[in-house]
Image (tube, grey):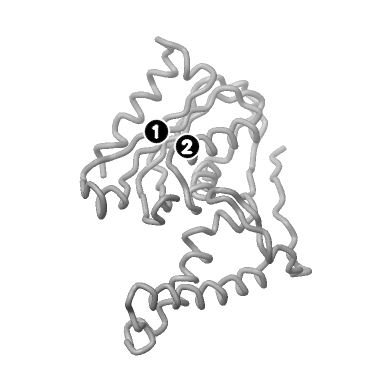
Amino acid sequence: TAYEIPKRDWSSDVCSSDLLLNKANENAPRSPKEIEKMIDKATKHYGEFLKAVGFDYEKDPQTVDTPRRVAKSWLKDLVIGSITDEPNITVFPNEENYNGIVIQTGIPVTSLCAHHNLPFVGYATVAYVPGNYVIGLSKLNRIVDWFARRPQMQESLTQQIHDFIAKKMECNSVAVSIASKHMCCSNRGIKHPTSTMTTNKFSGVFMEKDNLIREEFLHAIAKNGVEF
């Protein structure tokens, strides 16, 4: 029988975390009321930021609403993985005792560099060798997106996805590969828009040299850095 990990019930809508601050890639779920309060506060401060760097945003019809747009884009989209409960994870018994590899390729990654708050985008490939459970396929995508939608270092993002899947599935053999282009590298600093960063985290059979399962995964991720 499949089962899901339930989400938190926010029906009481209690605001209890006004003073709770996360590290960049951590998670602290907030109620809808708390999120609206955060948007209001961020709107005010982003307006002050624009003024501090020399823009009178209130006199320009193109930017008069920019502070609220930015605040909403962060809290409703860009960092939503920081303030929402983990996705419902549906797992199923591995009734046939399947012991081959399961690979999901081409999972979109959209995240923010924790250092400069500029986007990095790319693709993830996630694989595992089942133990007692298999996972609903779309859940791998949801896990990647939940961890990506917060300020991140790509190295940490790769590790977090790996550890979450290994723990939730009680699985010893998990592999995660991410290839991304970083705007902090393409639009500032060295200004090299064609460079791609790849990070990998392997465990279990994926660490074994000359293992056919490992070779199959390496073949799958070979396309990651050249197809976007």
| Amino acid residing under circle 1 | Thr
Residue 122: image quadrant is: top left
Quarter of the image with the C terminus in it: top left
Three-letter code, disc 2: Thr
Q: Position of residue 43 (x, y in %)?
A: 50, 76
Q: Residue 157 placed where, x, y %? A: 48, 41
Kindly identify the residue that appears in the image at 47 percent across and 77 percent down: 68
Across and down, in percent, residue 167 comes to 64, 32
The x, y position of residue 90, in whole percent, is 64, 43
Above or below for 92 versus 40: above
What residue is shown at x 61% (from left), y 26% (from top)?
A: 171
Q: Nearer the viewer, residue 224 or 4?
A: 224
Query: In the visual, does 187 lie left or right of 158?
Result: left
Q: Are the residues flagged by discs 1 and 2 in contact, CB closer than 8 Å? A: yes
Query: Label 1 vs label 2: CA separation?
Result: 7 Å
Q: Secondary structure at mark 1?
A: strand
Q: Which residue, as the protein is rendered here, is positioned at the far right? A: 12
Q: Which mark is residue 158?
A: 2
Label placed on residue 199: 1
Foreground residue, 11 or 37? 37
